[in-house]
Protein backbone atom coordinates (compact mmCIF):
# COMPACT_ATOMS: atom_id res chain seq x y z
CA UNK A 1 0.00 0.00 0.00
CA UNK A 2 1.99 2.99 -1.27
CA UNK A 3 -0.46 5.84 -0.51
CA UNK A 4 1.01 8.98 1.16
CA UNK A 5 1.70 8.24 4.80
CA UNK A 6 3.28 10.27 7.58
CA UNK A 7 5.47 9.15 10.47
CA UNK A 8 5.99 12.66 11.84
CA UNK A 9 4.51 11.58 15.18
CA UNK A 10 7.47 9.22 15.48
CA UNK A 11 10.04 11.80 14.46
CA UNK A 12 10.48 10.45 10.92
CA UNK A 13 10.63 13.23 8.32
CA UNK A 14 11.76 11.23 5.25
CA UNK A 15 9.61 12.03 2.24
CA UNK A 16 9.43 8.54 0.75
CA UNK A 17 7.66 6.27 3.22
CA UNK A 18 6.28 2.97 1.91
CA UNK A 19 3.61 1.47 4.14
CA UNK A 20 2.73 -2.21 3.91
CA UNK A 21 4.14 -2.83 0.46
CA UNK A 22 3.21 -6.15 -1.13
CA UNK A 23 5.81 -8.94 -1.17
CA UNK A 24 6.35 -8.36 -4.91
CA UNK A 25 7.05 -4.65 -4.37
CA UNK A 26 9.42 -5.44 -1.49
CA UNK A 27 11.26 -7.91 -3.73
CA UNK A 28 11.74 -5.12 -6.27
CA UNK A 29 12.96 -2.71 -3.61
CA UNK A 30 15.37 -5.27 -2.14
CA UNK A 31 16.88 -6.31 -5.48
CA UNK A 32 17.37 -2.69 -6.52
CA UNK A 33 18.69 -1.26 -3.29
CA UNK A 34 20.22 -4.03 -1.13
CA UNK A 35 23.66 -5.26 -2.14
CA UNK A 36 23.90 -9.05 -2.27
CA UNK A 37 20.17 -9.70 -2.17
CA UNK A 38 18.98 -12.30 -4.68
CA UNK A 39 16.17 -14.72 -5.53
CA UNK A 40 16.43 -18.48 -5.11
CA UNK A 41 15.43 -20.99 -7.77
CA UNK A 42 12.22 -21.63 -5.79
CA UNK A 43 11.34 -17.92 -5.61
CA UNK A 44 12.55 -17.02 -2.10
CA UNK A 45 14.14 -13.65 -1.37
CA UNK A 46 17.70 -14.38 -0.23
CA UNK A 47 18.94 -11.71 2.19
CA UNK A 48 21.89 -11.24 4.53
CA UNK A 49 21.98 -9.76 8.01
CA UNK A 50 25.66 -8.77 8.01
CA UNK A 51 27.94 -9.47 10.95
CA UNK A 52 25.13 -10.46 13.28
CA UNK A 53 23.58 -13.77 12.26
CA UNK A 54 21.78 -14.38 15.54
CA UNK A 55 20.32 -12.55 18.51
CA UNK A 56 22.46 -10.52 20.94
CA UNK A 57 20.89 -11.34 24.35
CA UNK A 58 23.65 -9.64 26.36
CA UNK A 59 22.87 -6.35 24.61
CA UNK A 60 19.17 -6.42 25.50
CA UNK A 61 17.96 -3.73 27.91
CA UNK A 62 14.63 -2.97 29.62
CA UNK A 63 13.93 0.53 30.90
CA UNK A 64 13.62 0.60 34.68
CA UNK A 65 10.47 2.61 35.39
CA UNK A 66 8.48 3.05 38.64
CA UNK A 67 5.33 1.65 37.01
CA UNK A 68 6.90 -1.69 36.07
CA UNK A 69 10.16 -2.14 37.98
CA UNK A 70 8.58 -4.34 40.67
CA UNK A 71 7.16 -6.65 37.99
CA UNK A 72 10.32 -7.21 35.96
CA UNK A 73 12.62 -10.16 36.63
CA UNK A 74 15.87 -8.20 36.72
CA UNK A 75 19.15 -10.01 36.18
CA UNK A 76 20.99 -11.72 33.34
CA UNK A 77 17.85 -11.80 31.15
CA UNK A 78 16.55 -8.28 31.76
CA UNK A 79 19.37 -5.78 32.22
CA UNK A 80 18.05 -2.42 33.48
CA UNK A 81 18.39 0.76 31.46
CA UNK A 82 17.65 4.30 32.62
CA UNK A 83 15.12 6.42 30.73
CA UNK A 84 17.72 8.96 29.58
CA UNK A 85 19.84 6.28 27.89
CA UNK A 86 16.77 4.91 26.13
CA UNK A 87 15.95 8.42 24.90
CA UNK A 88 19.50 8.89 23.62
CA UNK A 89 19.42 5.61 21.70
CA UNK A 90 15.93 6.37 20.38
CA UNK A 91 17.14 9.76 19.11
CA UNK A 92 20.18 8.10 17.52
CA UNK A 93 17.91 5.60 15.75
CA UNK A 94 15.55 8.30 14.48
CA UNK A 95 18.46 10.44 13.26
CA UNK A 96 19.80 7.46 11.31
CA UNK A 97 16.41 6.62 9.79
CA UNK A 98 16.04 10.25 8.72
CA UNK A 99 19.28 10.00 6.69
CA UNK A 100 17.77 7.24 4.51
CA UNK A 101 16.18 8.12 1.19
CA UNK A 102 13.39 5.60 1.77
CA UNK A 103 11.67 4.23 4.86
CA UNK A 104 9.52 1.12 5.05
CA UNK A 105 6.66 0.90 7.52
CA UNK A 106 4.81 -2.29 8.43
CA UNK A 107 1.55 -1.98 10.37
CA UNK A 108 0.18 -5.33 11.50
CA UNK A 109 -1.11 -7.29 14.48
CA UNK A 110 0.34 -9.59 17.13
CA UNK A 111 -2.10 -12.16 18.52
CA UNK A 112 -4.92 -13.94 16.69
CA UNK A 113 -7.32 -13.53 19.63
CA UNK A 114 -9.25 -10.35 18.71
CA UNK A 115 -9.85 -9.58 22.40
CA UNK A 116 -6.14 -9.21 23.20
CA UNK A 117 -4.31 -8.61 19.93
CA UNK A 118 -2.05 -5.56 19.72
CA UNK A 119 -1.22 -3.24 16.84
CA UNK A 120 2.49 -3.23 15.95
CA UNK A 121 4.29 -0.64 13.83
CA UNK A 122 7.74 -1.45 12.43
CA UNK A 123 9.82 1.41 11.01
CA UNK A 124 12.89 0.21 9.11
CA UNK A 125 15.30 1.09 6.31
CA UNK A 126 15.66 -2.32 4.64
CA UNK A 127 13.02 -3.96 2.38
CA UNK A 128 14.23 -7.35 3.67
CA UNK A 129 13.26 -6.34 7.22
CA UNK A 130 9.88 -5.10 6.05
CA UNK A 131 9.14 -8.36 4.21
CA UNK A 132 10.31 -10.36 7.22
CA UNK A 133 7.84 -8.59 9.54
CA UNK A 134 5.12 -8.67 6.89
CA UNK A 135 5.49 -12.45 7.10
CA UNK A 136 5.91 -12.79 10.86
CA UNK A 137 3.09 -10.51 12.00
CA UNK A 138 -0.62 -10.98 11.28
CA UNK A 139 -1.36 -9.18 8.05
CA UNK A 140 -4.24 -6.66 8.06
CA UNK A 141 -6.58 -6.14 5.15
CA UNK A 142 -6.57 -2.86 3.22
CA UNK A 143 -9.72 -1.91 5.14
CA UNK A 144 -8.00 -2.67 8.45
CA UNK A 145 -5.15 -0.34 7.48
CA UNK A 146 -7.52 2.55 6.85
CA UNK A 147 -8.78 2.33 10.45
CA UNK A 148 -5.54 1.06 11.99
CA UNK A 149 -5.02 4.13 14.17
CA UNK A 150 -2.20 4.49 16.66
CA UNK A 151 -0.03 1.42 17.32
CA UNK A 152 0.34 -0.30 20.69
CA UNK A 153 4.02 -1.08 20.06
CA UNK A 154 6.54 0.69 17.82
CA UNK A 155 9.85 -0.81 16.67
CA UNK A 156 12.53 1.61 15.44
CA UNK A 157 14.89 -0.63 13.46
CA UNK A 158 18.09 1.33 12.92
CA UNK A 159 20.17 -1.84 12.91
CA UNK A 160 22.44 -0.51 10.18
CA UNK A 161 23.79 2.12 12.58
CA UNK A 162 25.81 1.19 15.68
CA UNK A 163 25.15 2.18 19.26
CA UNK A 164 27.62 4.62 20.77
CA UNK A 165 29.81 2.49 23.02
CA UNK A 166 30.40 5.48 25.30
CA UNK A 167 26.69 5.88 26.04
CA UNK A 168 25.90 4.79 29.60
CA UNK A 169 25.27 1.07 29.91
CA UNK A 170 26.40 0.04 26.44
CA UNK A 171 28.40 -3.17 26.31
CA UNK A 172 29.01 -3.19 22.56
CA UNK A 173 28.01 -1.43 19.36
CA UNK A 174 24.71 -3.38 19.50
CA UNK A 175 21.77 -2.34 21.63
CA UNK A 176 18.26 -3.82 21.85
CA UNK A 177 16.16 -1.56 24.08
CA UNK A 178 12.58 -1.99 25.31
CA UNK A 179 10.48 0.59 27.13
CA UNK A 180 7.38 -1.04 28.59
CA UNK A 181 5.84 2.33 29.40
CA UNK A 182 6.48 3.99 26.04
CA UNK A 183 5.75 0.68 24.31
CA UNK A 184 8.73 1.17 22.07
CA UNK A 185 11.71 -0.90 20.92
CA UNK A 186 14.95 0.57 19.58
CA UNK A 187 17.42 -1.56 17.59
CA UNK A 188 20.98 -0.38 16.94
CA UNK A 189 23.98 -2.22 15.56
CA UNK A 190 22.25 -5.45 14.46
CA UNK A 191 20.47 -6.24 11.22
CA UNK A 192 19.48 -9.74 12.28
CA UNK A 193 15.74 -9.79 11.59
CA UNK A 194 14.97 -12.18 14.44
CA UNK A 195 15.55 -9.34 16.92
CA UNK A 196 12.31 -7.72 15.75
CA UNK A 197 10.31 -10.92 16.08
CA UNK A 198 11.58 -11.58 19.59
CA UNK A 199 11.11 -7.95 20.64
CA UNK A 200 7.39 -8.35 19.93
CA UNK A 201 7.34 -11.63 21.86
CA UNK A 202 9.16 -10.07 24.82
CA UNK A 203 6.57 -7.30 24.98
CA UNK A 204 3.75 -9.87 24.79
CA UNK A 205 5.46 -11.82 27.58
CA UNK A 206 4.82 -8.79 29.77
CA UNK A 207 1.47 -7.68 28.40
CA UNK A 208 -0.40 -11.04 28.32
CA UNK A 209 0.36 -12.30 31.89
CA UNK A 210 -0.79 -8.92 33.22
CA UNK A 211 -4.23 -9.94 31.89
CA UNK A 212 -4.09 -13.47 33.27
CA UNK A 213 -3.10 -14.94 29.89
CA UNK A 214 -0.17 -17.35 29.70
CA UNK A 215 2.34 -16.41 27.01
CA UNK A 216 4.30 -19.41 25.79
CA UNK A 217 7.39 -20.16 23.71
CA UNK A 218 5.92 -23.27 22.11
CA UNK A 219 4.34 -24.79 19.03
CA UNK A 220 0.67 -25.73 18.90
CA UNK A 221 -1.43 -28.07 16.80
CA UNK A 222 -5.10 -29.04 16.83
CA UNK A 223 -7.05 -32.22 16.22
CA UNK A 224 -8.81 -32.07 12.86
CA UNK A 225 -12.09 -33.36 14.32
CA UNK A 226 -12.40 -32.13 17.90
CA UNK A 227 -10.33 -28.91 17.51
CA UNK A 228 -8.70 -29.78 20.84
CA UNK A 229 -5.21 -28.38 20.82
CA UNK A 230 -1.84 -29.72 21.89
CA UNK A 231 1.05 -27.54 23.06
CA UNK A 232 4.69 -28.46 22.53
CA UNK A 233 7.52 -26.71 24.40
CA UNK A 234 11.17 -27.20 23.56
CA UNK A 235 14.45 -25.37 23.20
CA UNK A 236 16.35 -25.12 19.92
CA UNK A 237 17.26 -28.51 18.50
CA UNK A 238 14.60 -30.51 20.35
CA UNK A 239 12.28 -30.88 17.35
CA UNK A 240 9.54 -28.40 18.23
CA UNK A 241 9.09 -27.03 14.71
CA UNK A 242 9.62 -30.40 13.01
CA UNK A 243 7.07 -32.23 15.16
CA UNK A 244 4.49 -29.47 14.84
CA UNK A 245 4.58 -29.88 11.04
CA UNK A 246 2.26 -32.87 11.37
CA UNK A 247 0.07 -33.51 8.30
CA UNK A 248 -2.43 -35.42 10.49
CA UNK A 249 -3.19 -32.28 12.53
CA UNK A 250 -3.85 -28.60 11.99
CA UNK A 251 -0.95 -26.26 12.65
CA UNK A 252 -1.81 -23.35 14.96
CA UNK A 253 1.77 -22.08 15.08
CA UNK A 254 5.37 -23.14 15.50
CA UNK A 255 6.83 -20.78 18.10
CA UNK A 256 4.79 -18.24 20.11
CA UNK A 257 1.32 -18.60 21.65
CA UNK A 258 -1.05 -17.36 24.29
CA UNK A 259 -3.45 -19.41 26.43
CA UNK A 260 -6.48 -17.38 27.48
CA UNK A 261 -9.94 -18.23 28.81
CA UNK A 262 -10.97 -18.62 25.16
CA UNK A 263 -8.31 -21.23 24.36
CA UNK A 264 -4.96 -21.18 22.57
CA UNK A 265 -3.99 -18.60 19.96
CA UNK A 266 -0.90 -17.93 17.87
CA UNK A 267 0.85 -14.62 18.51
CA UNK A 268 2.43 -14.57 15.04
CA UNK A 269 1.28 -14.63 11.45
CA UNK A 270 4.21 -16.65 10.15
CA UNK A 271 6.93 -19.21 10.82
CA UNK A 272 10.67 -18.71 11.26
CA UNK A 273 12.02 -22.18 10.59
CA UNK A 274 15.60 -23.36 10.76
CA UNK A 275 16.86 -24.15 7.26
CA UNK A 276 20.18 -25.81 8.07
CA UNK A 277 20.39 -29.33 6.60
CA UNK A 278 16.78 -29.04 5.41
CA UNK A 279 15.62 -31.64 2.88
CA UNK A 280 12.36 -32.42 1.15
CA UNK A 281 12.46 -35.94 2.54
CA UNK A 282 13.02 -34.99 6.19
CA UNK A 283 10.65 -32.01 6.47
CA UNK A 284 8.46 -31.80 3.34
CA UNK A 285 5.95 -29.27 4.74
CA UNK A 286 8.66 -26.75 5.66
CA UNK A 287 10.67 -27.39 2.49
CA UNK A 288 7.65 -26.73 0.29
CA UNK A 289 6.91 -23.47 2.17
CA UNK A 290 10.17 -21.97 0.89
CA UNK A 291 8.73 -20.28 -2.19
CA UNK A 292 7.87 -16.80 -3.49
CA UNK A 293 7.17 -14.53 -0.53
CA UNK A 294 9.57 -16.33 1.82
CA UNK A 295 12.70 -14.68 3.18
CA UNK A 296 15.72 -17.01 3.23
CA UNK A 297 18.27 -15.58 5.62
CA UNK A 298 22.07 -16.00 5.42
CA UNK A 299 22.04 -19.07 3.16
CA UNK A 300 24.64 -20.01 0.55
CA UNK A 301 23.51 -20.54 -3.03
CA UNK A 302 24.95 -21.50 -6.39
CA UNK A 303 25.39 -18.25 -8.34
CA UNK A 304 24.79 -20.01 -11.66
CA UNK A 305 21.42 -21.64 -10.87
CA UNK A 306 20.47 -19.89 -7.59
CA UNK A 307 20.00 -23.27 -5.96
CA UNK A 308 20.38 -23.05 -2.18
CA UNK A 309 22.78 -25.42 -0.43
CA UNK A 310 21.17 -25.96 2.95
CA UNK A 311 24.17 -28.02 4.08
CA UNK A 312 26.57 -25.10 3.64
CA UNK A 313 27.07 -23.42 7.03
CA UNK A 314 30.01 -21.23 5.99
CA UNK A 315 28.05 -18.08 6.89
CA UNK A 316 26.22 -19.43 9.92
CA UNK A 317 24.53 -22.54 11.27
CA UNK A 318 21.54 -20.30 12.02
CA UNK A 319 20.13 -20.18 8.48
CA UNK A 320 16.37 -19.62 8.48
CA UNK A 321 13.29 -19.20 6.37
CA UNK A 322 10.52 -16.75 7.30
CA UNK A 323 7.18 -17.30 5.59
CA UNK A 324 3.46 -16.64 6.18
CA UNK A 325 1.80 -19.44 8.11
CA UNK A 326 -0.61 -19.94 5.20
CA UNK A 327 2.34 -21.45 3.30
CA UNK A 328 2.03 -24.52 5.57
CA UNK A 329 -0.46 -26.94 4.02
CA UNK A 330 -1.92 -27.91 7.40
CA UNK A 331 -2.25 -24.39 8.82
CA UNK A 332 -5.55 -23.50 10.52
CA UNK A 333 -6.67 -19.95 9.73
CA UNK A 334 -7.48 -18.12 11.95
CA UNK A 335 -4.75 -19.57 14.16
CA UNK A 336 -6.85 -20.32 17.23
CA UNK A 337 -7.96 -23.53 18.91
CA UNK A 338 -9.75 -24.74 22.02
CA UNK A 339 -8.00 -25.55 25.29
CA UNK A 340 -5.23 -28.18 25.04
CA UNK A 341 -5.82 -31.81 25.90
CA UNK A 342 -2.07 -32.41 26.05
CA UNK A 343 1.06 -30.43 26.89
CA UNK A 344 4.41 -31.82 25.78
CA UNK A 345 7.84 -30.79 27.07
CA UNK A 346 10.50 -31.77 24.53
CA UNK A 347 14.06 -32.31 25.63
CA UNK A 348 17.06 -33.51 23.70
CA UNK A 349 18.79 -35.31 26.55
CA UNK A 350 22.30 -36.09 25.33
CA UNK A 351 23.06 -37.83 28.64
CA UNK A 352 20.60 -40.61 27.75
CA UNK A 353 18.90 -40.49 31.17
CA UNK A 354 15.40 -39.30 30.31
CA UNK A 355 12.93 -41.88 28.95
CA UNK A 356 11.31 -41.55 25.52
CA UNK A 357 8.13 -40.42 27.33
CA UNK A 358 7.00 -39.82 30.92
CA UNK A 359 3.74 -38.58 32.42
CA UNK A 360 3.98 -35.53 34.73
CA UNK A 361 1.85 -34.31 37.63
CA UNK A 362 0.87 -30.59 37.74
CA UNK A 363 3.65 -30.01 40.30
CA UNK A 364 6.19 -31.76 38.10
CA UNK A 365 4.90 -29.73 35.17
CA UNK A 366 5.77 -26.54 37.05
CA UNK A 367 9.19 -27.94 38.01
CA UNK A 368 10.21 -29.03 34.52
CA UNK A 369 8.63 -25.94 32.93
CA UNK A 370 10.68 -23.64 35.14
CA UNK A 371 13.77 -25.80 34.56
CA UNK A 372 13.44 -25.73 30.74
CA UNK A 373 16.02 -28.45 30.24
CA UNK A 374 17.81 -29.79 27.22
CA UNK A 375 21.42 -30.88 26.61
CA UNK A 376 23.88 -29.86 23.95
CA UNK A 377 26.30 -32.33 22.41
CA UNK A 378 29.93 -31.78 23.36
CA UNK A 379 31.92 -29.75 20.86
CA UNK A 380 35.10 -30.62 19.00
CA UNK A 381 37.47 -29.14 21.59
CA UNK A 382 40.18 -31.62 22.63
CA UNK A 383 39.34 -33.41 25.88
CA UNK A 384 35.65 -32.40 25.94
CA UNK A 385 33.63 -35.59 25.80
CA UNK A 386 30.63 -34.94 28.07
CA UNK A 387 27.39 -33.27 26.93
CA UNK A 388 26.47 -29.90 28.37
CA UNK A 389 23.23 -29.46 30.34
CA UNK A 390 21.29 -26.35 29.32
CA UNK A 391 18.48 -24.77 31.35
CA UNK A 392 16.26 -21.99 30.02
CA UNK A 393 13.32 -21.16 32.31
CA UNK A 394 9.89 -21.74 30.78
CA UNK A 395 11.70 -22.92 27.62
CA UNK A 396 12.15 -19.27 26.68
CA UNK A 397 14.36 -17.58 29.27
CA UNK A 398 15.77 -14.82 27.03
CA UNK A 399 12.25 -13.50 26.35
CA UNK A 400 10.74 -13.56 29.84
CA UNK A 401 9.91 -10.33 31.63
CA UNK A 402 8.13 -11.51 34.78
CA UNK A 403 9.75 -14.03 37.15
CA UNK A 404 9.51 -17.61 35.78
CA UNK A 405 7.29 -18.52 38.72
CA UNK A 406 4.56 -16.22 37.37
CA UNK A 407 4.37 -18.14 34.09
CA UNK A 408 4.62 -21.51 35.86
CA UNK A 409 1.72 -20.71 38.21
CA UNK A 410 -0.42 -19.63 35.28
CA UNK A 411 0.45 -22.89 33.52
CA UNK A 412 -0.43 -25.03 36.56
CA UNK A 413 -3.75 -23.21 37.05
CA UNK A 414 -4.73 -23.81 33.45
CA UNK A 415 -3.60 -27.45 33.51
CA UNK A 416 -5.83 -28.13 36.51
CA UNK A 417 -8.80 -26.11 35.23
CA UNK A 418 -8.82 -27.77 31.81
CA UNK A 419 -7.56 -31.20 32.94
CA UNK A 420 -4.73 -31.31 30.42
CA UNK A 421 -2.29 -34.23 30.38
CA UNK A 422 1.39 -33.25 30.65
CA UNK A 423 4.20 -35.26 29.09
CA UNK A 424 7.99 -35.18 29.01
CA UNK A 425 9.32 -36.47 25.68
CA UNK A 426 13.02 -37.12 25.06
CA UNK A 427 14.17 -36.60 21.47
CA UNK A 428 17.80 -37.13 22.51
CA UNK A 429 19.88 -40.19 23.26
CA UNK A 430 18.84 -43.72 24.20
CA UNK A 431 20.88 -46.70 25.39
CA UNK A 432 23.68 -44.47 26.70
CA UNK A 433 24.89 -40.92 26.48
CA UNK A 434 26.25 -39.16 23.40
CA UNK A 435 29.17 -41.21 22.07
CA UNK A 436 27.83 -44.46 23.51
CA UNK A 437 24.11 -44.59 22.86
CA UNK A 438 22.22 -43.46 19.77
CA UNK A 439 19.85 -40.61 18.93
CA UNK A 440 16.16 -41.43 19.25
CA UNK A 441 14.89 -42.02 15.69
CA UNK A 442 12.39 -39.41 14.56
CA UNK A 443 9.90 -42.12 13.57
CA UNK A 444 9.79 -43.34 17.19
CA UNK A 445 9.26 -39.83 18.53
CA UNK A 446 6.47 -39.31 16.00
CA UNK A 447 4.88 -42.58 17.18
CA UNK A 448 5.01 -41.34 20.78
CA UNK A 449 3.45 -38.00 19.88
CA UNK A 450 0.77 -39.83 17.87
CA UNK A 451 0.10 -42.03 20.92
CA UNK A 452 -0.31 -38.96 23.08
CA UNK A 453 -2.72 -37.30 20.67
CA UNK A 454 -4.78 -40.47 20.13
CA UNK A 455 -5.20 -40.94 23.88
CA UNK A 456 -3.40 -44.30 23.79
CA UNK A 457 -0.68 -43.25 26.24
CA UNK A 458 -3.14 -41.80 28.75
CA UNK A 459 -4.03 -45.35 29.77
CA UNK A 460 -0.64 -46.96 29.10
CA UNK A 461 1.20 -48.61 32.02
CA UNK A 462 3.86 -46.58 33.84
CA UNK A 463 6.71 -47.35 36.20
CA UNK A 464 8.22 -44.89 38.69
CA UNK A 465 11.93 -44.15 38.17
CA UNK A 466 13.45 -43.53 41.63
CA UNK A 467 16.16 -40.91 40.95
CA UNK A 468 14.49 -38.47 38.56
CA UNK A 469 11.09 -39.35 40.03
CA UNK A 470 9.40 -39.75 36.65
CA UNK A 471 6.44 -41.98 35.78
CA UNK A 472 7.86 -43.68 32.70
CA UNK A 473 5.41 -44.94 30.08
CA UNK A 474 6.48 -48.50 29.30
CA UNK A 475 4.42 -49.29 26.19
CA UNK A 476 3.82 -47.36 22.98
CA UNK A 477 2.74 -48.74 19.65
CA UNK A 478 5.53 -48.39 17.10
CA UNK A 479 8.36 -48.10 19.65
CA UNK A 480 10.44 -51.12 20.75
CA UNK A 481 9.66 -52.01 24.37
CA UNK A 482 13.35 -52.26 25.26
CA UNK A 483 13.81 -48.57 24.44
CA UNK A 484 11.04 -47.29 26.71
CA UNK A 485 12.98 -47.60 29.98
CA UNK A 486 16.52 -46.14 29.94
CA UNK A 487 17.66 -48.28 32.87
CA UNK A 488 17.02 -51.37 30.72
CA UNK A 489 18.47 -49.98 27.50
CA UNK A 490 21.87 -49.14 29.03
CA UNK A 491 24.38 -52.00 29.01
CA UNK A 492 25.90 -50.95 32.32
CA UNK A 493 23.33 -50.44 35.10
CA UNK A 494 25.88 -48.91 37.48
CA UNK A 495 26.97 -46.36 34.88
CA UNK A 496 23.32 -45.44 34.30
CA UNK A 497 22.69 -44.84 37.99
CA UNK A 498 25.83 -42.71 38.36
CA UNK A 499 24.89 -40.63 35.32
CA UNK A 500 21.33 -40.25 36.61
CA UNK A 501 22.53 -38.93 39.96
CA UNK A 502 24.83 -36.43 38.25
CA UNK A 503 21.98 -35.11 36.11
CA UNK A 504 19.63 -34.99 39.13
CA UNK A 505 22.21 -32.88 40.97
CA UNK A 506 22.41 -30.46 38.04
CA UNK A 507 18.64 -30.04 38.18
CA UNK A 508 18.62 -29.38 41.92
CA UNK A 509 21.44 -26.84 41.66
CA UNK A 510 19.75 -25.02 38.81
CA UNK A 511 16.39 -24.91 40.62
CA UNK A 512 17.80 -23.35 43.79
CA UNK A 513 17.41 -19.85 42.33
CA UNK A 514 13.67 -20.39 41.77
CA UNK A 515 12.76 -22.39 44.89
CA UNK A 516 11.70 -19.38 46.99
CA UNK A 517 9.11 -18.33 44.40
CA UNK A 518 7.17 -21.63 44.23
CA UNK A 519 5.43 -23.95 46.68
CA UNK A 520 7.43 -26.62 48.49
CA UNK A 521 5.39 -29.29 46.68
CA UNK A 522 6.89 -28.10 43.39
CA UNK A 523 10.45 -28.26 44.72
CA UNK A 524 9.92 -31.76 46.12
CA UNK A 525 8.46 -32.98 42.81
CA UNK A 526 11.90 -32.72 41.18
CA UNK A 527 14.73 -35.27 41.23
CA UNK A 528 15.43 -36.90 44.58
CA UNK A 529 18.47 -35.93 46.61
CA UNK A 530 21.36 -38.40 46.57
Image (cartoon, helix red, strand yellow):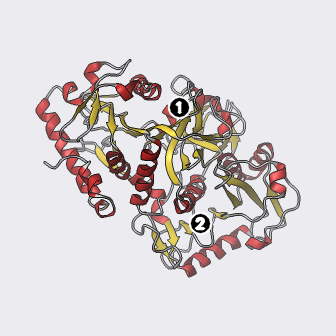
Seen at 51% across and 25% down, the residue is 282
Q: Nearer the viewer, residue 134 or 246?
A: 246
Residue 28 visible in rendering? yes
Q: Is residue 41 left or right of residue 236?
A: right
Circle 2 residue: 188
Q: Is residue 85 left or right of residue 374?
A: right
Seen at 26% across and 32% down, the residue is 435
Residue 434 visible in rendering? no
Instruction: Give the x, y percent position of residue 408.
Output: 41, 54
Q: Is residue 220 left or right of residue 129?
A: left
Q: Nearer the viewer, residue 126 or 429?
A: 429
Instruction: Give the x, y percent position of residue 403.
Output: 41, 63
Circle 1 residue: 278
Q: Label 2: state its secondary structure.
A: strand
Using the rendered view, name the quadrant where residue 415 is placed: top left
Residue lying furthest right in this view? 3
Instruction: Give the x, y percent position of residue 512.
Output: 26, 60
Q: Nearer the viewer, residue 299 or 405?
A: 405
| Other-residue count near label 2 (Cα within 10 Å), few / some / many at <14 / 14–19 / ≥20 | many
Residue lying furthest left in this view? 494
Residue lying furthest front in this view? 417
Mark sitting on residue 491: none
Question: Residue 270, relative to residue 277: is it above or below?
Answer: below
Seen at 74% across and 71% down, the residue is 10
Using the rendered view, name the quadrant where residue 122 is placed: bottom right
Find the distance from the CA under tag 2 to the CA under tag 1.
31 Å
- First of labels 2, 1 by sequence position: 2
Instruction: Give the x, y percent position of residue 72.
Output: 46, 68
Q: Nearer the viewer, residue 178 or 477?
A: 477
Amino acid sequence: MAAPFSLHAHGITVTEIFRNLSPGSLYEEAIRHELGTSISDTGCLIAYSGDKTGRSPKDKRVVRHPDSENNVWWGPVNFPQDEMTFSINRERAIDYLNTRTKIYCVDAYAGWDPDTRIKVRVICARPYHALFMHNMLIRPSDQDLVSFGEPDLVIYNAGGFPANRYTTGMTSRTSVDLSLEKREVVLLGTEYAGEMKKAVFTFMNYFLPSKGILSMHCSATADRNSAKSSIMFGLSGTGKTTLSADPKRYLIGDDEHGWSDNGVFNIEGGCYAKAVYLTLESEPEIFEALKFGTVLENVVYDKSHHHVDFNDTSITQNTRGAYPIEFMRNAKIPCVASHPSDIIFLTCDAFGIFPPVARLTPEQAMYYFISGYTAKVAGTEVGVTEPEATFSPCFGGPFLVWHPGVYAKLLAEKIRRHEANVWLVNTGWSGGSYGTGSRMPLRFTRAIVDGIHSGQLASAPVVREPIMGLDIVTECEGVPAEMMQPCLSWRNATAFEEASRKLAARFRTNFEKYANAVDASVVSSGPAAS
